[in-house]
Amino acid sequence: MSSLNFIGGEKGGVGKSVVARLLAQYFIDQDKAFIGFDTDRSHTSFTRFYADYASPILVDSYEGLDQMVGIYEAAPEGELPRVIVDLAAQTASPLARWIKDSDLLALLADMGITVNFWHVADAGKDSVDLLGRLIETYGAGPNYVVVKNQGRGSDFSQLDHSAAMEKALELGAKVISLGQLHEASMRKIDRQNASFWGAIHNRAEVDTLGLLERQRVKTWLKRSYDALDSLPL
């Protein structure tokens, strides 16, 4: 199954790039081919950690955004790839204009390509409001995945009982929880500029993870993969 995965949430600091990196590692470990795109000009986190798979694009340019779909046309017949797009904060408006002007959802549906909008949420009200805006923008048609990032909060009752979540569930949205990875371990991984696989297996760098840190990352990945296994990816 080919899919176009927009990893968003609109606000900064909710963990969009971590989810993009997690999904990339999941596809790698599942031996599923994919191509990644990074729209964050300031941090380019996705490209930094998965440079062999992801490349930067400009989200405020139709020519830049067109690259995400152009790869489907260039792919051999029957080998359409999965695509992961790490959306920077405040990219919803230009993305929506491009999708609407290109009638993208209808085009990809005709091509048999699934569109997944990932809404990465913290426990704050902004994430609730932004989920409502996402649903209002695209309505029925694409798939929605709501990610409750427990690394950015623990009480998601405001989101769970919101009208936005109710509407998302009516449209068939899937909801998963992403557990918190120990902060010190994540800092070491970030300083290494390493993929999750690289961080677990690296023994040579200054910021090498210790035995128990590697075990915690493995456990976090396993639990996260169990959540991803429940999705139509």
Image (cartoon, rainbow, N blue to C red):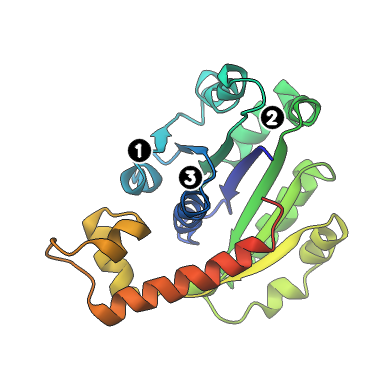
Does label 3 or label 2 sit earlier along the sequence? 3
Give the label on residue 88, or none.
3
Give the label on residue 52, or none.
1
Residue under numbered circle 2: 99
Q: The residue under label 1 is which amino acid type? A: Asp
Residue 75 shows in this picture: yes
Distance of label 1 from label 3 (alpha carbons): 20 Å
Q: Secondary structure at mark 3?
A: loop
> What is the x, y in percent for residue 217?
38, 72
Distance of label 1 from label 2 (alpha carbons): 27 Å
Q: Residues within 10 Å of mark 3 (few under 14, many from 20)?
A: many
Distance of label 3 from label 2 (alpha carbons): 16 Å
**For residue 153, side relative to residue 219 (left or right):** right
Q: CB atoms at circles 1 and 3 under 8 Å apart?
A: no
Give the label on residue 90, or none.
none
What residue is shown at x 47% (from left), y 54% (from top)?
A: 29
Does label 1 or label 3 sit earlier along the sequence? 1
Of 114 and 86, nearer the camera is 114
Q: The residue under label 2 is which amino acid type? A: Ile
Q: The residue under label 3 is which amino acid type? A: Ala
Q: CB atoms at circles 1 and 2 under 8 Å apart?
A: no
Does label 1 or label 2 sit earlier along the sequence? 1
**For residue 164, side relative to residue 35 (left or right):** right
> What is the x, y in percent for residue 117?
67, 47
